[in-house]
């Protein structure tokens, strides 16, 4: 996710693709855009505004588009199998171990996938196979991989022998940001509160795609949910999905609450499937506290996705293929043949990889995060999400030391006061967000 997405021609190009995927007839827009690119040496923001304000609003949805994809919580609940849950009672030690496991799992998964972010599966396979690292069993060794040795220093910090704490990454920054927001506002926070927390804590050039567009929209006075819609062609990309963890961590055994909290965060920057992705992941994380079966965890998460949406269809299809085939590589081939056409950081194809990794990983932490990375696309995001879910299932105490020890219980961040911060302290602060100490005391789980 880079600066190219700020460019006016990329905004228009990606909006045309977004509208096409959403069932609109974009033929007129495509022809006009081609003419602009041919006639004009430069494509300015004034040109982009003309498309967003004049051309795109007059496009019409095709009659044969069969999906129903609302962006309002009430309508999402109507179109899904939303189910209320009661929060389970845990001993405090058990709960902290699982939350800490989620934080560590997310950090390890993010670090494992960081060197190959945006790479295709074929490219990753070539690199790993040529250096005798396939299948992936540990952090990537960059010693003999020219393309990775030439990466930026932050990516190199995520390779074997160079890891000294969790390198800074936006995937981890957003977990901290949501912690800050919840500590200030509690579970009654609003989407506007999330936006204000972004502006107070995140540097503009360290957020990407939808988040960067929304950052700009907030500064220019667009309040949510309009902040998610204004000149934002990335509103169904993965940005919200990577922000889900905190809402699952503070909702142990309560996916209903997790999904509703995630909605408030997601609707600041995303619509439709972009929102569903965060609700899906938050619900799965909440379920992982009380269920160690990845299949059942995915099925529970699906209850919080509209059943006639593209994301629901992709998750259901991926699960069916994964359950009928023990070879994750074959599952990947079949699933990506159908959903590989989406952008590398779209919600739908990356959510499919998360599901594939969970089911084919069968609850094994090492195998699950490795599949997520070897699958390509947004490798750090997907491996971080998978690591968080399986980390909650397992708890911190039993996570494999080869992935955890190099992190030294530290997480780097550009957020003020959180540079080189203890992950265990983040876990404790997360625990205190759930309920009062008295209400948390109870039986063991």
Image (cartoon, rainbow, N blue to C red):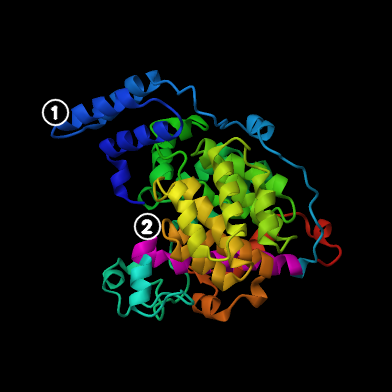
* Total numbered circles: 2
- Frontmost residue, 391 versus 342: 342
**Image spot of residue 350 (x, y percent):** 48, 52
- Classify mark 2: helix, strand or loop: loop
**Image spot of residue 433 (x, y percent):** 69, 55
- Residue at the (67%, 70%) spot, across then down: 395
- Residue at the (51%, 35%) spot, across then down: 271
Indicate left or right for 283 with 104 as reference: right
> Is residue 264 positioned above or below 327 on the image?
above
- Dividing the picture into quadrants, the one containing residue 96 is bottom right
Q: Which residue is mark 1?
A: 39
Residue 309 sits inside the magenta stretch: no
Q: Which residue is mark 2?
A: 118
**Image spot of residue 71 (x, y percent):** 56, 32
> Is residue 97 positioned above or below 301 on the image?
below
Residue 100 sits inside the magenta stretch: yes
- Frontmost residue, 223 versus 5: 5
Q: Magenta span: helix, strand or loop, mainly?
A: helix
Range of magenta residues: 94-123
| Residue furthest right in the image | 443
């Amino acid at each position: 996710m880079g600066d190219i997405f700020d460019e006016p021609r990329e905004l228009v190009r990606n909006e045309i693709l977004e509208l096409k995927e959403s069932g609109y007839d974009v033929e007129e827009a495509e022809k006009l855009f081609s003419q602009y690119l041919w006639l004009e040496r430069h494509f300015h923001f004034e040109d982009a505004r003309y498309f967003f304000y004049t051309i795109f609003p007059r496009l019409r949805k095709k009659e044969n588009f069969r999906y129903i994809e609302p962006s309002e919580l009430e309508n999402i609940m109507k179109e899904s199998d939303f189910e209320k849950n009661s929060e389970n009672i845990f001993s405090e030690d058990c709960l902290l171990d699982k939350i800490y496991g989620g934080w560590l799992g997310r950090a390890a998964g993010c670090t494992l996938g960081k060197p190959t972010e945006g790479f295709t599966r074929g490219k990753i396979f070539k690199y790993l196979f040529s250096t005798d690292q396939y299948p992936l069993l540990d952090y990537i060794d960059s010693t003999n991989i020219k393309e990775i040795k030439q990466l930026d220093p932050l990516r190199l910090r995520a390779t074997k022998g160079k890891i000294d704490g969790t390198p800074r990454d936006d995937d981890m920054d957003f977990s901290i940001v949501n912690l800050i927001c919840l500590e200030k506002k509690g579970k009654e926070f609003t989407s506007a509160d999330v936006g204000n927390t972004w502006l107070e804590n995140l540097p503009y050039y360290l957020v990407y795609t939808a988040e960067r567009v929304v950052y700009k929209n907030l500064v220019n006075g667009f309040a949510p949910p309009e902040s998610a819609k204004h000149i934002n062609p990335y509103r169904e990309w993965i940005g919200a999905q990577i922000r889900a963890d905190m809402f699952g961590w503070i909702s142990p055994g309560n996916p209903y609450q997790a999904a509703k909290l995630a909605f408030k965060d997601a609707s600041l920057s995303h619509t439709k499937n972009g929102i569903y992705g965060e609700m899906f992941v938050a619900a799965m994380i909440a379920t992982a506290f009380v269920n160690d079966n990845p299949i059942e965890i995915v099925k529970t998460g699906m209850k919080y996705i509209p059943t006639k949406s593209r994301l629901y269809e992709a998750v259901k299809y991926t699960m069916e293929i994964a359950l009928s085939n023990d070879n994750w590589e074959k599952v990947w081939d079949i699933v990506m043949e159908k959903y590989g056409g989406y952008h590398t950081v779209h919600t739908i194809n990356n959510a499919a990889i998360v599901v594939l990794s969970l089911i084919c990983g069968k609850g094994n932490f090492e195998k699950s995060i490795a599949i997520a990375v070897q699958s390509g696309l947004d490798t750090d995001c997907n491996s971080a999400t998978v690591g968080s879910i399986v980390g909650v299932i397992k708890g911190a105490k039993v996570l494999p030391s080869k992935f955890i020890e190099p992190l030294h219980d530290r997480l780097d961040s550009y957020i003020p006061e959180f540079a080189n911060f203890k992950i265990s302290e983040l876990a404790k602060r997360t625990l205190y967000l759930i309920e009062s100490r008295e209400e948390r005391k109870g039986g063991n789980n």
